[in-house]
Image (cartoon, helix red, strand yellow):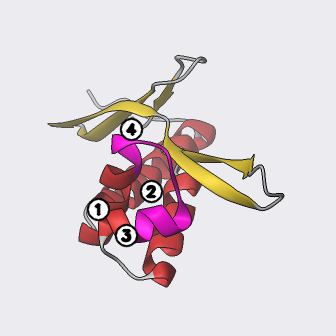
Amino acid sequence: MAMKLSATEQDRAEDSVETDLTLLELLGDEYTRQVLAAVTEQPRSGSEVVDAAEVSKATAYRRLDALEDAGLVDSEMVFDPDGHHHERFHVVVGSIDITFGDDGVKIAVEIDDEDSTAIPHGV
């Protein structure tokens, strides 16, 4: 017997699947993975990410923005002693678990910061 979802549950399930697909697309991009690896090694400024990931400035910032939007990377403003300032990017994800099953794809993102909260994805 098939279980019928309410309209709200179905909307949530569709949003979750869309979010999962967006996250998979994001992580499926070679440049995104290079940028993510750079900030996983250590917190870095945008120009340091460009050098470490060996990507263009535009590519680095586009990928950093996308990773921030996905909740995998965060940034903070750093003020230098000489009065200059820049953003420093750091990874906030501790792990990403992807499960493929009969009921579709499920993604669970565990945040690795003081909050230690998890962002569940999937249905």
**Mark before the other along the chain sequence, 2 or 4:** 2
Q: Position of residue 112 (x, y in %)?
A: 46, 25
Residue 122 image label = 4
Q: Position of residue 41 (x, y in %)?
A: 33, 42
Judge whether 64 appears above or below 73 on screen. below
Residue 34 image label = 1
How far apart marks 3 and 4 lie (CA) works out to 35 Å
Three-letter amino acid code of the residue under disc 3:
Asp
Region of the chain picked out in magenta, as a range:
39-50
Q: Are marks 1 and 2 in contact (CB under 8 Å)?
A: no
How far apart marks 1 and 4 lie (CA) works out to 25 Å
Select label 3 or label 4 by which is in front. Answer: 3
Q: Are marks 1 and 4 in contact (CB under 8 Å)?
A: no
Quadrant that contains the C terminus: top left
In this view, the residue farthest toward the front is: 82
Q: Are marks 2 and 4 in contact (CB under 8 Å)?
A: no
